[in-house]
Image (cartoon, rainbow, N blue to C red):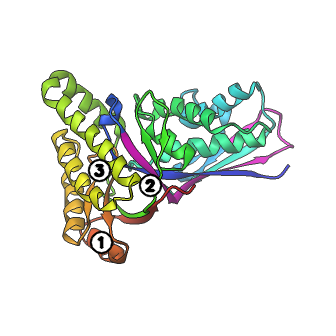
Amino acid sequence: MPAITATAPGKIILFGEHAVVYGRPAIAVPVNQVRARATVVATPREAPGTIRLQALDIGLDTNYGDLPPDHPLAYAIHLVLETIGLKEAPACVIRVTSSIPLASGMGSGAAVTVALMRALAAFLGHPLPDERVNHLTYDVEKLYHGTPSGIDNTVVTYAKPVFFTRGEDPQMLTVPQPFTIVIGDTGIPCSTAITVGDVRDALQEQPEEYEPVLDEIGEIGDQARSAIEAGGVGELGQLMVSNQRLLQQLNVSSPELERLIQAAMGAGALGAKMSGGGRGGNMIALVEPDITDKITEALQASGAVRTITTVVDDQP
Protein backbone atom coordinates (compact mmCIF):
# COMPACT_ATOMS: atom_id res chain seq x y z
CA MET A 1 0.00 0.00 0.00
CA PRO A 2 1.53 3.35 -1.01
CA ALA A 3 2.12 6.10 1.52
CA ILE A 4 -0.72 8.61 1.82
CA THR A 5 0.09 12.27 2.47
CA ALA A 6 -2.12 15.26 3.22
CA THR A 7 -1.23 18.86 4.00
CA ALA A 8 -2.99 21.90 5.45
CA PRO A 9 -2.00 25.59 5.53
CA GLY A 10 -1.41 27.98 8.37
CA LYS A 11 -3.72 30.94 8.87
CA ILE A 12 -3.90 34.50 10.08
CA ILE A 13 -6.86 36.49 11.35
CA LEU A 14 -7.22 39.78 9.48
CA PHE A 15 -10.06 41.19 11.58
CA GLY A 16 -12.19 40.21 14.54
CA GLU A 17 -10.02 38.24 16.95
CA HIS A 18 -11.52 37.93 20.43
CA ALA A 19 -14.80 39.53 19.33
CA VAL A 20 -15.48 36.43 17.23
CA VAL A 21 -15.79 34.41 20.44
CA TYR A 22 -18.87 36.49 21.29
CA GLY A 23 -20.74 36.24 18.02
CA ARG A 24 -19.19 39.12 16.12
CA PRO A 25 -17.81 38.42 12.63
CA ALA A 26 -14.19 37.82 11.82
CA ILE A 27 -12.13 37.42 8.68
CA ALA A 28 -9.32 34.89 8.41
CA VAL A 29 -7.18 33.81 5.48
CA PRO A 30 -4.91 30.84 4.79
CA VAL A 31 -1.13 31.22 4.70
CA ASN A 32 0.09 28.67 2.20
CA GLN A 33 3.77 29.51 2.70
CA VAL A 34 3.69 27.43 5.90
CA ARG A 35 2.00 24.05 6.12
CA ALA A 36 1.45 20.97 8.26
CA ARG A 37 2.00 17.60 6.64
CA ALA A 38 0.91 14.10 7.69
CA THR A 39 2.03 10.91 5.97
CA VAL A 40 0.61 7.45 6.72
CA VAL A 41 2.67 4.38 5.83
CA ALA A 42 1.47 0.79 6.23
CA THR A 43 3.57 -1.48 8.50
CA PRO A 44 2.17 -4.92 7.65
CA ARG A 45 4.71 -6.75 9.81
CA GLU A 46 3.22 -5.14 12.92
CA ALA A 47 0.14 -6.45 14.69
CA PRO A 48 -3.20 -5.09 13.41
CA GLY A 49 -4.23 -1.99 15.33
CA THR A 50 -0.64 -0.85 15.93
CA ILE A 51 -0.40 2.84 15.08
CA ARG A 52 2.97 4.50 15.58
CA LEU A 53 2.72 8.27 15.86
CA GLN A 54 5.81 10.31 15.05
CA ALA A 55 5.85 14.10 15.46
CA LEU A 56 9.56 14.66 15.84
CA ASP A 57 9.18 18.46 15.80
CA ILE A 58 7.74 18.14 19.31
CA GLY A 59 9.77 15.10 20.35
CA LEU A 60 6.94 12.60 20.00
CA ASP A 61 7.55 9.03 18.83
CA THR A 62 5.23 6.55 20.48
CA ASN A 63 2.36 4.16 19.99
CA TYR A 64 -1.09 5.68 19.68
CA GLY A 65 -2.39 3.39 22.44
CA ASP A 66 0.21 4.71 24.90
CA LEU A 67 -0.99 8.30 24.67
CA PRO A 68 -3.66 9.67 27.02
CA PRO A 69 -7.11 9.93 25.39
CA ASP A 70 -7.06 13.72 25.67
CA HIS A 71 -3.79 14.13 23.79
CA PRO A 72 -4.80 16.20 20.73
CA LEU A 73 -3.14 13.92 18.17
CA ALA A 74 -4.44 10.77 19.83
CA TYR A 75 -7.92 12.28 20.00
CA ALA A 76 -7.74 13.17 16.30
CA ILE A 77 -6.93 9.54 15.46
CA HIS A 78 -9.74 8.34 17.72
CA LEU A 79 -12.27 10.63 16.04
CA VAL A 80 -11.32 9.40 12.56
CA LEU A 81 -11.64 5.74 13.59
CA GLU A 82 -14.94 6.43 15.34
CA THR A 83 -16.34 8.35 12.37
CA ILE A 84 -15.42 5.61 9.92
CA GLY A 85 -16.64 2.92 12.31
CA LEU A 86 -13.37 1.04 12.79
CA LYS A 87 -12.34 -0.39 16.12
CA GLU A 88 -8.95 -1.41 14.80
CA ALA A 89 -6.94 0.13 11.98
CA PRO A 90 -4.36 -1.67 9.85
CA ALA A 91 -0.89 -1.30 11.33
CA CYS A 92 0.74 1.91 10.21
CA VAL A 93 3.05 4.78 11.06
CA ILE A 94 1.73 8.35 11.00
CA ARG A 95 4.45 10.96 10.54
CA VAL A 96 3.57 14.58 11.24
CA THR A 97 5.70 17.61 10.42
CA SER A 98 4.94 21.31 10.29
CA SER A 99 6.62 24.52 9.19
CA ILE A 100 3.97 26.60 11.00
CA PRO A 101 5.41 28.39 14.05
CA LEU A 102 4.02 26.93 17.28
CA ALA A 103 1.95 29.03 19.69
CA SER A 104 2.03 32.00 17.34
CA GLY A 105 -1.61 32.40 16.36
CA MET A 106 -1.11 30.83 12.94
CA GLY A 107 -3.32 27.79 13.46
CA SER A 108 -0.60 25.15 13.84
CA GLY A 109 -2.81 22.90 15.97
CA ALA A 110 -5.71 23.04 13.54
CA ALA A 111 -3.45 22.48 10.53
CA VAL A 112 -1.81 19.41 12.05
CA THR A 113 -5.20 17.98 12.93
CA VAL A 114 -6.64 18.58 9.45
CA ALA A 115 -3.62 17.05 7.74
CA LEU A 116 -3.58 14.02 10.06
CA MET A 117 -7.31 13.36 9.73
CA ARG A 118 -7.29 13.63 5.95
CA ALA A 119 -4.24 11.40 5.54
CA LEU A 120 -5.50 8.74 7.93
CA ALA A 121 -9.04 8.68 6.52
CA ALA A 122 -7.67 8.37 2.97
CA PHE A 123 -5.29 5.58 4.09
CA LEU A 124 -8.30 3.72 5.52
CA GLY A 125 -10.19 4.11 2.25
CA HIS A 126 -12.79 6.53 3.61
CA PRO A 127 -11.87 10.12 2.70
CA LEU A 128 -13.87 12.58 4.76
CA PRO A 129 -15.72 15.57 3.27
CA ASP A 130 -14.53 19.04 4.22
CA GLU A 131 -17.55 19.73 6.39
CA ARG A 132 -16.88 16.63 8.48
CA VAL A 133 -13.16 17.39 8.78
CA ASN A 134 -14.07 20.89 9.94
CA HIS A 135 -16.42 19.67 12.67
CA LEU A 136 -14.01 17.02 13.92
CA THR A 137 -11.10 19.46 13.98
CA TYR A 138 -13.20 21.85 16.04
CA ASP A 139 -13.63 19.07 18.63
CA VAL A 140 -9.85 18.69 18.81
CA GLU A 141 -9.39 22.48 19.00
CA LYS A 142 -11.25 22.42 22.33
CA LEU A 143 -8.28 20.57 23.80
CA TYR A 144 -5.91 23.31 22.63
CA HIS A 145 -7.98 26.41 23.34
CA GLY A 146 -10.77 25.56 25.77
CA THR A 147 -13.54 27.54 24.09
CA PRO A 148 -12.37 28.08 20.50
CA SER A 149 -14.34 30.31 18.17
CA GLY A 150 -14.17 27.80 15.34
CA ILE A 151 -12.39 30.14 12.96
CA ASP A 152 -9.03 28.31 12.92
CA ASN A 153 -10.44 24.94 11.93
CA THR A 154 -12.71 26.55 9.34
CA VAL A 155 -10.13 28.57 7.40
CA VAL A 156 -7.54 25.78 7.61
CA THR A 157 -10.00 23.13 6.42
CA TYR A 158 -11.30 25.07 3.44
CA ALA A 159 -7.99 26.86 2.69
CA LYS A 160 -9.80 29.97 1.47
CA PRO A 161 -10.51 33.43 2.92
CA VAL A 162 -13.43 33.08 5.28
CA PHE A 163 -15.99 35.47 6.75
CA PHE A 164 -16.92 33.71 9.94
CA THR A 165 -19.58 34.24 12.57
CA ARG A 166 -19.80 31.72 15.38
CA GLY A 167 -22.81 29.44 15.07
CA GLU A 168 -23.36 30.27 11.39
CA ASP A 169 -22.19 28.58 8.23
CA PRO A 170 -18.84 30.03 7.10
CA GLN A 171 -18.94 32.22 4.03
CA MET A 172 -16.09 32.07 1.54
CA LEU A 173 -14.92 35.52 0.46
CA THR A 174 -14.34 36.61 -3.10
CA VAL A 175 -11.14 38.61 -3.50
CA PRO A 176 -11.24 40.40 -6.87
CA GLN A 177 -8.13 42.43 -6.00
CA PRO A 178 -5.42 40.31 -4.30
CA PHE A 179 -3.41 42.06 -1.60
CA THR A 180 -0.12 41.51 0.16
CA ILE A 181 0.37 40.89 3.88
CA VAL A 182 3.70 40.72 5.70
CA ILE A 183 3.60 38.73 8.93
CA GLY A 184 6.03 39.56 11.72
CA ASP A 185 6.61 37.02 14.49
CA THR A 186 7.59 38.35 17.91
CA GLY A 187 9.03 34.95 18.83
CA ILE A 188 7.03 35.04 22.05
CA PRO A 189 4.71 32.05 22.50
CA CYS A 190 1.10 33.08 23.00
CA SER A 191 -1.65 31.10 24.68
CA THR A 192 -4.98 31.79 23.04
CA ALA A 193 -6.74 30.01 25.89
CA ILE A 194 -5.24 32.44 28.43
CA THR A 195 -5.97 35.65 26.53
CA VAL A 196 -9.49 34.50 25.63
CA GLY A 197 -10.04 33.68 29.29
CA ASP A 198 -8.78 37.10 30.41
CA VAL A 199 -11.11 38.88 27.98
CA ARG A 200 -13.99 36.74 29.22
CA ASP A 201 -13.25 37.68 32.81
CA ALA A 202 -13.07 41.38 31.93
CA LEU A 203 -16.33 41.18 30.02
CA GLN A 204 -18.08 39.54 32.94
CA GLU A 205 -16.77 42.11 35.40
CA GLN A 206 -17.34 45.22 33.25
CA PRO A 207 -19.76 44.44 30.41
CA GLU A 208 -20.67 48.09 29.99
CA GLU A 209 -17.04 48.87 29.13
CA TYR A 210 -16.14 45.91 26.96
CA GLU A 211 -19.34 45.06 25.04
CA PRO A 212 -19.13 48.30 22.99
CA VAL A 213 -15.51 47.46 22.10
CA LEU A 214 -16.57 44.07 20.80
CA ASP A 215 -19.40 45.69 18.86
CA GLU A 216 -16.97 48.08 17.18
CA ILE A 217 -14.63 45.25 16.25
CA GLY A 218 -17.60 43.44 14.71
CA GLU A 219 -18.55 46.52 12.70
CA ILE A 220 -15.00 46.74 11.38
CA GLY A 221 -15.26 43.12 10.28
CA ASP A 222 -18.37 43.92 8.26
CA GLN A 223 -16.71 46.96 6.70
CA ALA A 224 -13.59 44.97 5.85
CA ARG A 225 -15.63 42.30 4.11
CA SER A 226 -17.34 44.90 1.96
CA ALA A 227 -14.00 46.49 1.09
CA ILE A 228 -12.36 43.18 0.18
CA GLU A 229 -15.22 41.99 -1.99
CA ALA A 230 -15.45 45.38 -3.73
CA GLY A 231 -11.72 45.33 -4.46
CA GLY A 232 -11.21 48.33 -2.20
CA VAL A 233 -7.94 47.22 -0.71
CA GLY A 234 -6.99 50.80 0.14
CA GLU A 235 -9.66 50.93 2.84
CA LEU A 236 -8.29 47.95 4.70
CA GLY A 237 -5.24 49.72 6.09
CA GLN A 238 -7.19 52.22 8.18
CA LEU A 239 -9.56 49.49 9.31
CA MET A 240 -6.56 47.53 10.58
CA VAL A 241 -5.32 50.56 12.52
CA SER A 242 -8.77 51.05 14.06
CA ASN A 243 -9.05 47.37 14.94
CA GLN A 244 -5.68 47.48 16.68
CA ARG A 245 -6.75 50.42 18.88
CA LEU A 246 -9.75 48.38 20.01
CA LEU A 247 -7.59 45.33 20.73
CA GLN A 248 -5.42 47.57 22.88
CA GLN A 249 -8.53 48.41 24.87
CA LEU A 250 -9.06 44.68 25.42
CA ASN A 251 -5.52 44.53 26.89
CA VAL A 252 -4.36 41.78 24.54
CA SER A 253 -1.51 43.58 22.78
CA SER A 254 2.05 43.77 24.11
CA PRO A 255 5.11 46.05 23.87
CA GLU A 256 6.74 43.62 21.42
CA LEU A 257 3.69 43.60 19.14
CA GLU A 258 3.38 47.38 19.32
CA ARG A 259 7.03 47.82 18.43
CA LEU A 260 6.64 45.71 15.29
CA ILE A 261 3.38 47.43 14.35
CA GLN A 262 5.01 50.85 14.62
CA ALA A 263 8.05 49.68 12.67
CA ALA A 264 5.83 48.51 9.82
CA MET A 265 3.83 51.71 9.78
CA GLY A 266 7.00 53.78 9.87
CA ALA A 267 8.33 51.88 6.86
CA GLY A 268 5.24 52.66 4.80
CA ALA A 269 2.70 49.94 5.57
CA LEU A 270 -0.90 50.85 4.73
CA GLY A 271 -2.03 49.39 8.05
CA ALA A 272 -0.87 47.00 10.74
CA LYS A 273 -2.27 45.14 13.74
CA MET A 274 -1.73 42.09 15.91
CA SER A 275 -3.21 38.83 14.69
CA GLY A 276 -4.50 36.06 16.92
CA GLY A 277 -4.71 35.79 20.68
CA GLY A 278 -2.12 38.48 21.38
CA ARG A 279 0.52 39.22 24.02
CA GLY A 280 2.98 37.53 21.69
CA GLY A 281 2.71 35.63 18.46
CA ASN A 282 2.29 37.61 15.26
CA MET A 283 1.41 40.98 13.86
CA ILE A 284 0.41 41.63 10.25
CA ALA A 285 0.99 44.55 7.91
CA LEU A 286 -0.86 45.44 4.72
CA VAL A 287 1.73 46.55 2.18
CA GLU A 288 2.17 47.56 -1.41
CA PRO A 289 4.05 44.72 -3.15
CA ASP A 290 6.97 46.94 -4.18
CA ILE A 291 7.93 47.77 -0.57
CA THR A 292 7.72 44.24 0.82
CA ASP A 293 11.49 44.06 1.31
CA LYS A 294 11.54 47.43 3.09
CA ILE A 295 8.81 46.33 5.51
CA THR A 296 10.53 43.00 6.13
CA GLU A 297 13.83 44.72 6.93
CA ALA A 298 12.10 47.14 9.31
CA LEU A 299 10.40 44.30 11.15
CA GLN A 300 13.60 42.31 11.48
CA ALA A 301 15.46 45.38 12.72
CA SER A 302 12.77 45.83 15.38
CA GLY A 303 13.01 42.30 16.72
CA ALA A 304 10.90 40.04 14.52
CA VAL A 305 12.37 36.54 14.70
CA ARG A 306 10.86 35.66 11.32
CA THR A 307 8.74 37.24 8.64
CA ILE A 308 6.43 35.67 6.07
CA THR A 309 4.98 37.40 3.04
CA THR A 310 1.67 36.11 1.71
CA VAL A 311 -0.72 37.23 -1.00
CA VAL A 312 -4.40 37.03 -0.13
CA ASP A 313 -6.66 35.85 -2.92
CA ASP A 314 -9.58 33.45 -3.22
CA GLN A 315 -7.75 30.63 -4.97
CA PRO A 316 -7.31 27.33 -3.06
Tell which residue pokes out farthest to the top in this image.
Answer: 204
Please state which of the two labelled residues, at mark 2 or mark 1, is closer to the viewer: 1
In the rendered structure, which amino acid carries the disc numbered 2? Pro
Regarding residue 61, the answer to whether it shows in the image is no
The residue under label 1 is 295
Q: Callout 2: 10 Å neighbours few (<14), some, many (20+)? A: some
Q: Nearer the viewer, residue 73 or 273?
A: 273
Magenta segment main secondary structure: strand
The residue under label 2 is 101
Q: Where is residue 189 in the image (x, y as percent from the top left)?
A: 35, 49
Sequence-wise, the earlier of marks 2 and 1 is 2
Magenta span of residues: 26-52
In the rendered structure, which amino acid carries the disc numbered 3? Gly
Q: Position of residue 49 (x, y in %)?
A: 78, 32
Q: What element carries label 1?
A: helix
Q: Which residue is drawn at 26% across and 72% down?
A: 298
Q: In this view, does 186 lie above or below 196?
A: below
Q: Are marks 2 and 3 in contact (CB under 8 Å)?
A: no
Q: Position of residue 87 (x, y in %)?
A: 76, 24
Q: Position of residue 242 (x, y in %)?
A: 20, 50
Q: Distance between the residues labelled 2 and 1?
A: 20 Å
Q: Residue at x 30, y 76 (%)?
A: 294
The residue under label 3 is 280
Q: Are marks 1 and 3 in contact (CB under 8 Å)?
A: no
In the rendered structure, which amino acid carries the disc numbered 1? Ile
Q: Is mark 2 on a helix, strand or loop?
A: loop
Sequence-wise, the earlier of marks 1 and 3 is 3
Q: Residue at x 45, y 51 (%)?
A: 29
Q: Does the magenta stretch include residue 283?
A: no
Horizontal side of residue 202 vs 51, given as left or right = left
Q: Distance between the residues labelled 2 and 3?
A: 12 Å
In which quadrant of the rendered view does residue 47 lie? top right
